[in-house]
Image (cartoon, helix red, strand yellow):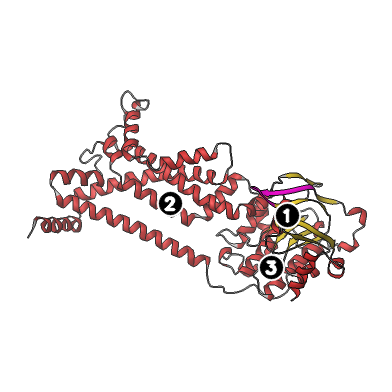
Amino acid sequence: MSSVSTSLVTAAQLISSGDSVLLSIVGRSLSVSALAVLIGGAAGLLLGAWLGVARYPGRPLVLVVLNSLLAVPSVVVGLLVYLFLSRSGPLGFLGWLFSFQAMVFAQSLLVLPVVTALTRQVVESAEATHGEQWRSLGAGTLARSVLLAFDERHALFMVFVTAFSRAITEVGAVMIVGGNIDGFTRVMTTAIALETSKGDLPLALALGFVLLAVMLALHGLAAFVQYARSRMDTGVQENPIRNDPPVALRHPPYFAGENKANELFAPTAVGEMPEGQRGRVISLESTCVKFGAQMALAPCSLSINQGERVALLGANGSGKSTLLRLLHGQQMPASGERVSHTDARQVMVFQQPHMLRLSALLNVTLALWFSGKSWTAAKTDARQALSSMGFESIMHRNARAMSVGQRQRLALVRAWALRPDMLFLDEPTASLDPKARRDVELLIQQFADSGCTLVFASHNLGQAKRLATRVIYLEQGKLLVDLPTKDFFNKELPNEAALFLQGERA
């Protein structure tokens, strides 16, 4: 039998017999790396989540430095830690050099930029997609960083797997600061290097096989977590929302902590409101929006009055969503002013509303908690709102696994629970089937009947007729028409608007 074959057989025997030296080295490696990932990973997770959401001067430079730290060789980190822990170094009084603690310290520094940079990328991506939703619901920078990091926990699990792989497979730092002392600071990578140089291939091979097995197990677990996440997010829809009319359509809900019935939701038809009481809520004064050099919304002036129901119509790219976000305060103008004439509570429901990977109940509870309620009152009010809107049987189901129509209705229930004075809706029934569209419009009508001011973007002319009292038509970022709904559909319009109506009716 060749020497290689003999070494392989002996290595297998060391593993199968549970050799004490082998187990000692493996246990020490796992302990050092796990503790380093726990310490460095926790710090990196918090820092990365904050960096993914926060905006501050010098941010590009910070990101360049952070990404550069990913490429720092482990021997350089080991050298720096050695200098700090040496007798003449600033941390020499700790007496950690050539110890378990020194190896943990070094690997924590290696793990920190990995977790920080990758967490920042994950959370920043989530912030770009869903940040506006949670800003609209009142979540600040810190709250959004925590929420989005938690919601992307499955992706962040992979970040920690990557960090652990970086820690347990590096050899330079632990060799320098640990000293590779047999039975004390020797880990798998340093033992493999030492035993190979000594010609003791069986132990080196056995340790190499164990290290590979650890990596395979970790990445297999990560793959399973990703698979479980996809199954959770696309779960089979069972026990759909009941079809009986929501209680709230007959009786506005009573919210916990109120001293009297909720006056905000007392039905008040817009037509019955005295003209003098319908004051301006929001005004734009010669306001425009630019994205770089491109004019997304030409200078325009308009006012939204209390109790109005305004439909924004126009083709794709006409500026509807930009105007909606500008009115809501989510978009900063390039020039001109946006003036809010009241301290009215404003909420926006997006075309694809974001739901955390939590129950429907907790998604609504969090929104109420951000509004200033105590957690107990928020949960009570959320439960009441969900029950009154027909979600009682599924309020504990994962909101992300619900159908598109259910999530859209849930977003409206979440907005309803906040009792807004003004509601913004971006294509609220896009991609919904006819039944889901009717259900959503029924909830929107309930907002309107309560006296809530509505501004919604839509392509659906029938929806504008049913829900709006006023129509604003946009074409290529320009506000071309602003008329009462009846006049918009019955009077002569500019050519662009007339062609749009003709195309929609065809």
**In the rendered structure, which disc, 1 or 2, sits on the residue that comes first in sequence?**
2
Q: Is residue 185 above or below residue 468?
A: above
Q: Residue 72, position in %: x, y?
A: 37, 39
Q: Position of residue 25 (x, y in %)?
A: 24, 46
Q: Secondary structure at mark 3?
A: loop
Between the residue at mark 1 and the residue at mark 3, the CA separation in whole angstroms equals 19 Å
User: In what element is the residue under mark 2?
Assistant: helix
Viewer-side label of 2, 3: 3
**Of the residues shown, which amino acid type is indicated by label 2?**
Val
- What is the crowding at mark 3: few (fewer than 14 residues within 10 Å), some, or many (at least 20)? many
- Residue at which label 2 appears: 159
Quadrant position of residue 465: bottom right
Q: Where residue 506 sits: x, y (%)? A: 74, 76
Name the residue type under label 1: Leu
Mark 3: amino acid: Thr
Q: Is residue 81 left or right of residue 22?
A: right
Above or below for 225 versus 40: below
Q: Which mark is residue 323?
A: 1
